[in-house]
Amino acid sequence: MDGEEGILLKVDLFLSELERRLEYLENYGECRIDASISKTFATLLAVRERCSQVSGELFGAGRRRLQVMVETLDTRYTEALAAAESMNEKARVGVELLDNMLTDFETRALKMRDQGFANAAGAAGSLMDEGRRVVDEGLDRARVVVDEGFERARRAKDSLEEHIQYAITRAREHGHLKYEELPVPWRVNPHILKGYRFCESKLACVRSVFRVSNETVNIWTHALGLALVLSIAFYFYPTSANFDQYSKTDVLIAAFFFFAACKCLICSTIWHTMNCVADQSLMECFACVDYTGISLLIAASIMTVEYTVFYCEPISRWAYMAATAFLGVAGVIMPWHPTFNGQDMAWLRVAFFVGLGTTGFMPVFQIIYTRGAAWALDFYMESNLLKSLSVYCLGACIYASKVPERWFPGAFDYFGNAHNLWHIAVLGGILYHYVAMQQFFSGAFKRAEGGCPAF
């Protein structure tokens, strides 16, 4: 496989085999390893131990294992990795070097077993000689690995293209694919076992919306949710009780919230429609579009709160809103970084969006200082804002934990899985925030009855 995901998969596969292969070698503990090759075997043991320590980490365990493996090798075989420029290339060289070490030891161990215990001493001597050769030839072999890296990358790309063509053929024959039939870049949730679409063109992706699949609920919850938000924006909001009190700026702020909500729902619907397209670059691009919609919605929601809480304090109002706008722009840009969209980065994405959302509480300290804790508590706790935030946070945790399908793989392929619940939570959060926004504006109008600066 090409790219970062390919090398992550390669490292994971190698490390999973490393434990088994080292156990096999350790069964031949009677083999004496002299000082000339002890460094080689100690390196293998160190890689196994240090990588196993980070395997349970919550955030990006795959990438951390790769980094730890490279760092361990770099401290022992600096020259071997010096020719590789990027972390991914160092990982490729490292896997090749470690694999050659293991293979050499395994070959000698097999020979020793075949010769029997009577010849164990001679076999151990051969093992030492071969170990010296491994160390001496390691640098040259590593350089060859770098030269061969481009050729392996080309072959990996060809292999991915073959898998894509196989998946397209299977989808034509059976309609849907199973998880293990998908090319690796399209594998997102291993607990959703079946019902996957895989389409050769963008038009085919659009047509698949009208067929039942494991994306049907994800697509239609936000497509129908978009219609609901539009009806609120163009009918219920203009006919609300306080609408005649809204200034043009007030309407503009509310309109920005509606725009961001609609954009979020549109981007989500587009992503879940197009995530089956048989083009990795295009598929990843649509994923980034989805994330930008979420960032914009969070920023717009926060700005409505800041606008209304500082309705009569223009300096504070625009200062906080400018800071939020800056963070929102950063949130629109960051998803386009390749790391952000990695398959093992779900918790990082959740942490980022939750962190962005918590910036909405930045004004709390100023409010407590100028108006008192009771006023701040009443403003935040007595409105529907708390309900909106609770729904968002609960949905985000469910999305990241992949519950309930993690507990019952295959049982929630079409309905009721974590992503379905996340979509419902997003829609609920939007609706609760709309009600909270109406409450905030009502309070702002009451505070402004004596007159206050508009800008």
Image: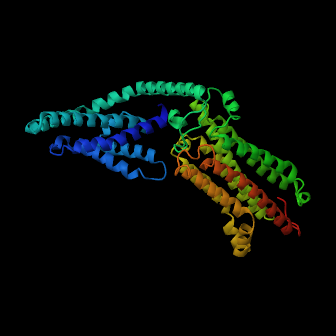
Left or right of residue 419, residue 15 in this image: left
Residue 244 in percent (x, y) is at 92, 58
Between 155 and 372, the one lying in front of the other is 155
Residue 195 in percent (x, y) is at 59, 37
Going 60% across and 50% down the picture, which residue do you hit? 418
Going 79% across and 48% down the picture, which residue do you hit? 228
- Number of numbered callouts drawn: 0
Q: Is residue 99 visible?
A: yes
Residue 311 in percent (x, y) is at 80, 63
Instruction: Identify whether 416 is placed above or below 317.
Output: above
- Quadrant in the picture for the C terminus: bottom right
Going 50% across and 36% down the picture, which residue do you hit? 180
Between 121 and 291, the one lying in front of the other is 121
Left or right of residue 319, residue 12 in this image: left
The image quarter in which residue 428 lies: bottom right
What is the residue that sits farthest to the right in this orientation? 244
Q: Is residue 325 visible?
A: no
Going 68% across and 67% down the picture, which residue do you hit? 364
Between 453 and 290, the one lying in front of the other is 290
What is the residue that sits farthest to the left in this orientation? 118
**Colouring chosen for the image of the structure:** rainbow
Residue 1 in percent (x, y) is at 47, 31
